[in-house]
Image (cartoon, grey):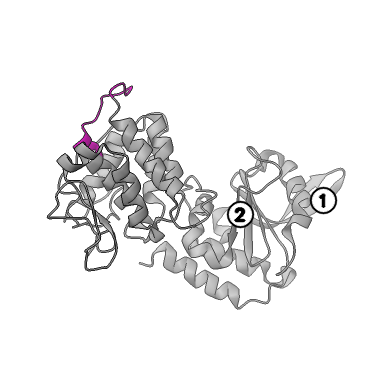
């Protein structure tokens, strides 16, 4: 079966061949978009083209409405979407019983996504068609079983700020007055490094794209727990046998050594928030030297020496890599899954 990324790439290649004619090509564009997200087509979802929206004794036609889910307004290629913001908002406000959670404006080259329940005047995200294969998690609500969208993933290289958030989460884990049980340093270090590997893996699709970020968000929901969700993920990443079903059935085996020991941690909301904020960066472009410097720098020098924590720049891949508390078995972020 094709992966979602492969389907999205096929869609974007097709869309690039279109002239961008609003009247003549919008419906085929949207139908192919829905197919890329796993549907037979727009009509099969219960969506409706040229949906009649009534207000002020007039009837307007919205390009597509999938009741309760999304309203999409198409414009010709090159059209400035900001000019048509009020039209899209008025359509949304007058959907009444079929009001969609999300609104998309699209000009064949860019998707502007709105969540008017939370932010009226600005899109919560803007996704160029050329980036859709790596940014489709912003449109997670288009899948047959909707997932929480991951907005404002700007796909910049991992910054010192993002790396610092991960280091800050580590420091919260080892605080003596932590609200939950204080985690020993070596265990906290291993757990945080496992999280970093997962962040990297989801952005190069060794894990399903956005999967680890989705788990982090689910951990913050009622009944969610990182002890169960992240612990289950890391155990499966260490398992040579694929999961026979359930949430982790698409998770691959990782043989980098860091998952040889899995000790789950019950993260607090503050710790989960730091990790989720770091997750929006593009960890596929991780600079291990930046992360390693900050992570190692967050530790006391004596403890750093005692734990054997170091940044290893002698790997065959030529990148700096972070050890997993074993100087003879360093973790190469570039060569994890072979």
The residue nearer to you, when weighing 94 against 97, is 94
Q: Which residue is mark 1?
A: 59
Residue at the front extreme? 301
227 in relation to 98, above or below: above
Q: Position of residue 269 (x, y in %)?
A: 40, 30
Instruction: Using the image, determine if residue 10 lies above or below residue 325.
Output: below
- Tag of residue 193: none
How far across and how far down the image is residue 77, in percent? 70, 70
SS class, disc 1? strand
Residue 243 appears anywhere in the view: no
Q: Position of residue 319 (x, y in %)?
A: 29, 63
Q: Quadrant of the C terminus?
A: bottom left
Q: Out of 185 and 85, give the one closest to the viewer.
A: 185
Sooner in the amino-acid sequence: mark 2 or mark 1? 2
Question: Residue at point 38% right, 67% down?
Answer: 2
Give the magenta part as a residue range. Answer: 176-188
């Amino acid at each position: 079966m094709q992966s979602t990324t492969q389907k999205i790439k096929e869609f974007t290649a097709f869309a690039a061949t279109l002239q961008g004619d609003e009247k003549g090509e919008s419906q085929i564009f949207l139908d192919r978009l829905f197919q890329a997200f796993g549907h037979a087509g727009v009509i099969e979802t219960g969506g409706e083209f040229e949906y009649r929206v009534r207000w002020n004794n007039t009837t307007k036609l919205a390009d597509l409405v999938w009741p309760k889910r999304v309203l999409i307004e198409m414009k010709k290629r090159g059209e400035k979407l900001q000019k048509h913001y009020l039209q899209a908002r008025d359509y949304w406000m007058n959907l009444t019983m079929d009001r969609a959670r999300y609104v998309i404006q699209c000009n064949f080259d860019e998707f502007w996504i709105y969540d008017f329940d939370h932010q009226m005047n600005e899109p919560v995200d803007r996704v160029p068609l050329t980036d859709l294969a790596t940014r489709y998690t912003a449109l997670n609500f288009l899948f047959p079983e909707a997932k929480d969208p991951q907005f404002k993933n700007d796909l910049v290289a991992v910054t010192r700020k993002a790396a610092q958030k991960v280091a800050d989460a580590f420091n919260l884990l080892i605080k003596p007055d932590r609200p939950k049980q204080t985690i020993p340093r070596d265990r906290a270090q291993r757990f945080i490094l496992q999280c970093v590997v997962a962040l990297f893996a989801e952005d190069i699709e060794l894990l399903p794209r956005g999967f680890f970020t989705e788990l982090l968000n689910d951990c913050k929901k009622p009944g969610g727990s990182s002890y169960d969700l992240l612990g289950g993920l890391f155990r499966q990443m260490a398992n040579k046998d694929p999961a026979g079903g359930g949430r982790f059935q698409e998770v691959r085996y990782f043989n980098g050594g860091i998952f040889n020991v899995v000790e789950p941690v019950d993260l607090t909301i503050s710790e989960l928030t730091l990790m989720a904020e770091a997750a929006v960066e593009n960890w596929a472009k991780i600079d291990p030297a930046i992360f390693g410097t900050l992570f190692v720098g967050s530790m006391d020098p004596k403890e750093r020496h005692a734990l054997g924590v170091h940044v290893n720049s002698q790997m065959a891949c030529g990148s700096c890599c972070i050890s997993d508390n074993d100087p003879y078995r360093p973790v190469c972020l570039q060569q994890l899954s072979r």
